[in-house]
Image (cartoon, rainbow, N blue to C red):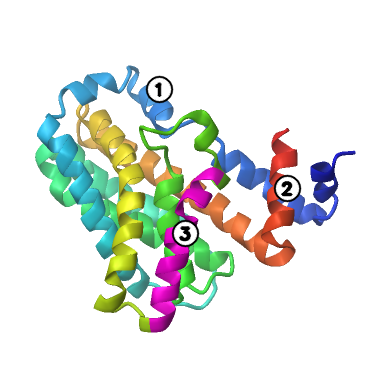
Amino acid sequence: MSVTQEFLHTLAAEDLRALAEAHALLERPSLAARLSSFIGSPLEKGLSRLPVSWRERIGGLAHDALLKAMDTAAKTLQPAVQPASPRLHKLLGSMSGAGGGAFGVAGLTVEIPLSTVLIMRSILDIARAEGEDIASAQARLAALEVFALGGNAASDDAAEAGYYAVRAALATTVSEATRHFAQKGLSSESAPALARLITLVAARYKVQLTQKAAGMLVPGIGAVAGATINLMFMNHFQDVSRGHFTMRRLERRYGEDAVRAAWQAMGS
């Protein structure tokens, strides 16, 4: 028995099942593949209808939406631990997507900020259910990480796109932002540290937003299909969130090294 396989036996049976579920959620097929399957054609058709200027603008929208969403979403949730409400967020996300599908490109300036707040709220809702203190900087920054874990940047290759690889890529910036928040709170003095992290996350989130916009712009896609695409988008980030915060819960119990070794053994 290898050293990594031995770590599998250090987890309680219930936690081993939770780890297996998290592994499945975080290593599932890409959002782009599932969107292409839904619309019945590659996303390139939608991308061809998305003006180049808008592709760049989506990056700016992603950055601004993430900056506002973390604080806005947290204010609408009570910190006390309670079960998550994924259905509520799926309903709200579908309604947001219906508007985006009906108004096409023009609707993105409203739809992207709104759906980002809803996704962040759902992520924090799931984090709270997994025992996170959503009033803390650590939990809010971990929620921000989900938007990066939700997809790969265009420059990633398969070896660099794994769950722990992405977390490692963000680790230094997350630690810096956490340290600033601990010292200064969510003030303007800590803004540069947060801005650096959001810039990294937004680069990955932009990929997902562009794919969603492309799906909505495929010929024949309207309000109903736009709602369905947004539902898929919400499902995607809820799944990633469940996986991520399950991993964090297990790491609090067993230590990051043990959980990572068990994760690696599960994938071997």
- Compare residues 77 and 32 and report the one nearer the observer: 32
Q: Sequence-wise, which precedes: disc 1 or disc 2?
A: 1
Report the number of numbered marks: 3
Q: Sequence-wise, which precedes: disc 2 or disc 3?
A: 3
Quadrant placement of the C terminus: top right
Dot 1 corresponds to which residue? 37
Residue at point 75% right, 40% down? Answer: 265
Quadrant placement of the N terminus: top right
Q: Distance between the residues labelled 3 and 1?
A: 37 Å
Residue at point 69% right, 45% down? Answer: 263
- Residue 123 in view: no
Q: Position of residue 40 (x, y in %)?
A: 35, 18
Q: Say which quarter of the image contains residue 5.
A: top right
Q: Is residue 210 magenta?
A: no
Check disc 3 and report its element: helix, strand or loop: helix
Q: Give the range drawn in magenta.
A: 165-183
Residue at point 80% right, 47% down? Answer: 8
Q: Which amino acid does label 2 sit on?
A: Ala
Q: Do the residues labelled 1 and 2 touch (CB within 8 Å)?
A: no
Q: Is residue 176 magenta?
A: yes
Q: Position of residue 98 (x, y in %)?
A: 23, 42
Residue at point 37% right, 71% down? Answer: 74
Q: Are marks 2 and 3 in contact (CB under 8 Å)?
A: no
Check disc 1 and report its element: helix, strand or loop: helix
Check disc 2 and report its element: helix, strand or loop: helix
Q: How far apart are marks 1 and 2 (CA)?
A: 34 Å
- Tag of residue 172: 3
Dot 2 corresponds to which residue? 261
Disc 2 residue crowd, few under 14, some 14–19, many 20+, Cα 10 Å:
some
Q: What residue type is labelled 1?
A: Ser
